[in-house]
Image (tube, rainbow, N blue to C red):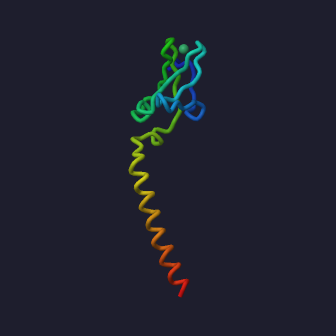
Amino acid sequence: MGAYYDEIEIEDMAWDPQKAVFHYPCPCGDRFEISRRQLADCEDIATCPSCSLVIRVIYDPLDFEDEPEESEDSSTENEGSDDGQVASLEKLSLDD
Ligand SMILES: [Zn+2]
């Protein structure tokens, strides 16, 4: 304990979509970085590549647990098509 330079909430970190890392300014002029993969593995230590400082990232591991983005999309698609069918049936009965 006490080995961290600071504790930072994930909401206060910035997301770099190109490197797929969350980052936060380091006092040395570089920045602390932690990858989404590390977060999914329940690692909460972001390191600065230019100095020996580390920060502890405060986050909810459930938010990063294996995130199956593709299956989320397909389930949304299914819900959409179901709604579409119900809507068209209702329209038909209304026209009568
Ligand atoms: Zn640094």
Residue 57 in the image, given as x and y percentages of width and height: 52, 29
Residue 53 in the image, given as x and y percentages of width and height: 52, 15
Answer with the quarter of the image where residue 94 lies.
bottom right
Q: Nearer the viewer, residue 39 or 71?
A: 71
What residue is drawn where x is 48% and y is 69%? 84
Q: How many marks?
A: 0
What residue is drawn where x is 39% and y is 51%? 71
What residue is drawn where x is 60% and y is 15%? 27
Q: Nearer the viewer, residue 36 or 87?
A: 87
State whether residue 90 is above or below residue 14: below
Q: Nearer the viewer, residue 6 or 50?
A: 50
State whether residue 69 is above or below residue 44: below
Specify whether 12 is left or right of 61: right
Q: Quadrant of ligand 1?
A: top right
Answer with the quarter of the image where residue 79 lies.
bottom left
Residue 31 in the image, given as x and y percentages of width and height: 55, 19
